[in-house]
Image (cartoon, rainbow, N blue to C red):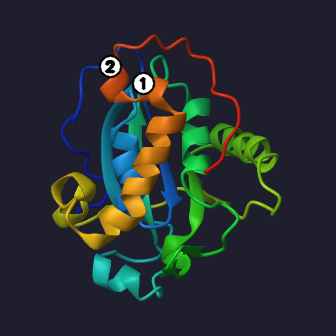
């Protein structure tokens, strides 16, 4: 694996200064697919982080390395406000489920936000606090200092687009994309001809 390597830009040129955040929401195939559909997203890659030692899929799947399957998202805040990205993040997985998303069980599937500065940590905490009002159970999303990031194997990048025939994509990811289209349509690249004012959509939910 190549630590902290950067991919070529995937989407259109940015209009302003870019930001990069690393988030974990269970299997990285899901958030990878979701993030690629949002306007203002410049690049996306599935990664491993939050553990010790070099990471690869086989090792991380044992749950013994401490790494999480995560997604590194580089975006233009002028086109996609960070608050919107965080709301999408919380509303497209279950942040109240500890070390589990559906049938994916283990610390590698934890809900987590990896901060790179004290300011970002505070921002993430505010996002968690804002999201909590939409859930009866406590949110268990962890705040973790961002350490070494290892790019996942090529077959895991943009998996949903390349392998829509796989059962996991059909039964797990497709419903998330349908939810995204119903509730976050104004922020989707496929609808970018629509007016985006920068105001947040009210509420979360599945």
> Where does the image place residue 33, in percent across and percent down from the top left?
34, 50
Answer yes or no: is residue 190 visible.
Answer: yes
Across and down, in percent, residue 202 comes to 69, 29
Q: Residues within 10 Å of mark 1 (few under 14, many from 20)?
A: many
- Residues at marks 2 and 1 touching, judged by CB atoms closer than 8 Å: yes
Q: Earlier in the sequence, mark 2 or mark 1?
A: 2
Image coordinates of residue 98 in percent, x first then y, are 66, 74
The structure residue drawn at horizontal position 51% and vertical position 59%, both measured from the top left corner, is: 24
Mark linked to residue 76: 1
Q: Residues within 10 Å of mark 2 (few under 14, many from 20)?
A: some
Residue under the point 24% across and 30% down: 11
The front one of 29 and 145 is 29
Q: Quadrant of residue 189?
A: top left
Q: Secondary structure at mark 1?
A: loop
Residue at x 51% of width, y 33% of height: 184
Task: Determine whether, in the image, residue 9 is placed left or right of residue 194.
Answer: left
User: Looking at the picture, does residue 30 appear above or below residue 117?
Assistant: below
Say which residue appears at 57% left-offset and 75% top-offset: 100
Q: Is residue 145 above or below residue 44?
A: below
In what element is the residue under mark 2?
loop
Q: Which residue is mark 2?
A: 14
Separation of disc 2 and disc 1 at Cα?
6 Å
Is residue 107 or residue 35 the one in the foreground? 35
């Amino acid at each position: 694996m190549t630590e902290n390597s950067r991919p070529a830009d995937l989407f259109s040129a940015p209009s302003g200064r870019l930001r990069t955040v690393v988030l974990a929401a269970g299997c990285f195939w899901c958030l990878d697919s979701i993030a690629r559909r949002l306007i203002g997203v410049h690049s996306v890659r599935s990664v491993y982080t939050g553990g010790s030692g070099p990471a690869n899929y086989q090792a991380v799947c044992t749950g013994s390395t401490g790494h999480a399957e995560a997604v590194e998202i580089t975006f233009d805040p002028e086109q996609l406000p960070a608050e919107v990205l965080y709301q999408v993040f919380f509303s497209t997985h279950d942040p109240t489920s500890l070390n589990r998303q559906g049938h994916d069980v283990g610390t590698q599937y934890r809900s987590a936000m990896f901060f790179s500065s004290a300011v970002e940590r505070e921002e993430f905490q505010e996002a968690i606090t804002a999201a909590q009002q939409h859930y009866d159970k406590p949110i268990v999303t962890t705040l973790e200092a961002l350490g070494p990031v290892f790019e996942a194997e090529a077959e895991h990048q943009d998996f949903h687009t390349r392998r829509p025939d796989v059962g996991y994509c059909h039964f797990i990811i497709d419903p998330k994309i349908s939810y995204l289209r119903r509730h976050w349509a104004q922020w989707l690249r496929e609808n970018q001809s629509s007016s985006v004012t920068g105001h947040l959509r009210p509420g979360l939910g599945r």
